[in-house]
Image (cartoon, grey):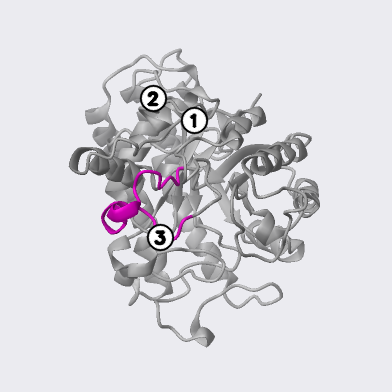
Amino acid sequence: MKGSIRQFLCLALTLTALSANAASRGDVNGDGEVNIGDVTYLIDMILDGNEDLKGDVNGDGEVNIADVTAAIDIILNGGSEEEPYDGPVVGGDISMLTKYEAHQLMAQQQYHINSAHYYDMNGRVIDDVITWAKQQGWNAARVRLFVNPANASATDKGQGVIQNLDTVKVLGRRIKEAGMQFMLDFHYSDSWADPVKQYTPAEWAGLNDEEVTVKIYEYTRDCLRALKDAGAKPDYIQTGNEISYGMLWGPVGTSASNLKKCYSGDETNWLRFTNLLKAAGRACREECPNAKIILHTERVAKPNIMLNFYNQMRSKGVDYDIIGLSYYPYYHGALSNLANALNNLTNSYQDKDIMIVETGYSYHYAISGDYDLTSTWPLTAEGQRQFTADLIARLKPYSKVKGLFWWFPEANEYGLGGSYWNTLHVNDAWYNAGLWNHETGRATPALYELKSFVE
């Protein structure tokens, strides 16, 4: 049987091999070239259980099918694939950008509202937000992905739940073409997934635990394949969004007592949850072997819950690379709370990098939360900039903190209101912690401040 498997795999891979010239990291058999011979050699190693690290093509510390995928990528690309970027990244979650752009174009062409644009801080029109942000020092951008946002409520759709796979293909490709790193944020839900709601997509609602584990693998795999085909291969992948208490709890309408949540001090649902993460992670390793996997939580203000989460990941053997955190002052408190969380994480998980994958602060009007820090950072453009500078200064001493992403920076209703509000506006509830001023359309000083994170 082993020989038959080897022959089948070698034949299939031979049909796809186009080039014999590639990077030396794929030279598994040591003959100075990377070609189908290395793939054959690597398959022998996997089938024979040989864990010699010369077969670790993707550099993840293991020798498995993901290394075969990486070797094929090298062969097909003629050795042109670059080593993954390992430096610091800074940018924002720009998931609503295409919708804003579409409405601005409608305002200009149909209603002759020439003011509907993104502007820099000096009032100059920005032709392309992504390439312009790159010029301001951003080197990364994040985009969320829902399973089927058409199933979301009207309220959620009106407040940003629109990102299906087609949306993400377009944005992801633009991000990559601009020379930026692309972070993909799987929500694994039809609508917002966060600490208080992690509802199973409607199409998956009838699946049992074993079936939903298979489904999350297949869905993750298929999405990544589609993104690669579209020129939008992710560099970072979040397998879940703010998953401190688990994910895929059950469909909307499930009674609270039956939701499969994960709590500190209760082992009931952790094995199910970590099996889901393992399945999603396996798809990531196979399809995007150079991408970094992020596990995203938001319990900065509750370090015991946060540490229990990552302890569970370690004890259950979940494969990932980066600890992702949300930090919003109005939800999580002063920077001292963030520092306490970072101290705990860097001491306990020295093998993991850390990213702040969501942050923000308002330039005008308070955002309701548990903390009022307006005496430290006034609700002004300068207060927002000072928050950004103080946050970066607090993060800089931590060598393990490799990323900083502003959430929803692209919010900009300028030129889309007035008598045309119902037709042109993009978001039903203005979010005043973006990096463009709704009342002027101009970039706020905080946007320019962000680049200091990578300088």
Give the label, 1 or 3, closer to the camera.
Answer: 3
CB of mark 1 within 8 Å of CB of mark 3?
no
Give the label, 3 or 2, closer to the camera.
Answer: 3
Q: How far apart, in angstroms, are the residues tagged by discs 1 and 2?
A: 10 Å
Viewer-closest of 395 and 349: 395
Along the polypeptide, which appears first: circle 1 or circle 3?
1
- Quick check: 368 left or right of 37? right
Kindly identify the residue that appears in the image at 43 percent across and 71 percent down.
199
Q: How far apart, in angstroms, are the residues tagged by discs 1 and 3?
A: 43 Å
Q: Amino acid at mark 1?
A: Val
Element type at marker 3? loop
Q: Which mark is residue 74?
A: 2
The answer to whether 402 is drawn above or below residue 205 in the figure is above
Along the polypeptide, which appears first: circle 3 or circle 2?
2
User: Badge 1: few (under 14), some or many (20 or more) residues near its Cα, within 10 Å?
Assistant: many
Along the polypeptide, which appears first: circle 1 or circle 2?
1
Q: Which residue is mark 3?
A: 159
Would residue 32 be seen by someone viewing this image from the given angle?
A: yes
The answer to whether 319 is drawn above or below residue 63 in the figure is below
Residue 222 coordinates in the image, percent (x, y) = 31, 50
CB of mark 1 within 8 Å of CB of mark 2?
yes
Q: Amino acid at mark 3?
A: Gln
Q: Amino acid at mark 2?
A: Ile
Q: Is residue 426 magenta?
A: yes
- Quick check: 77 left or right of 292? left
Residue 389 coordinates in the image, percent (x, y) = 71, 36
Q: Which residue is mark 1?
A: 57
Please give the range of residues in magenta: 410-430
Q: Quadrant of the C terminus?
A: top right
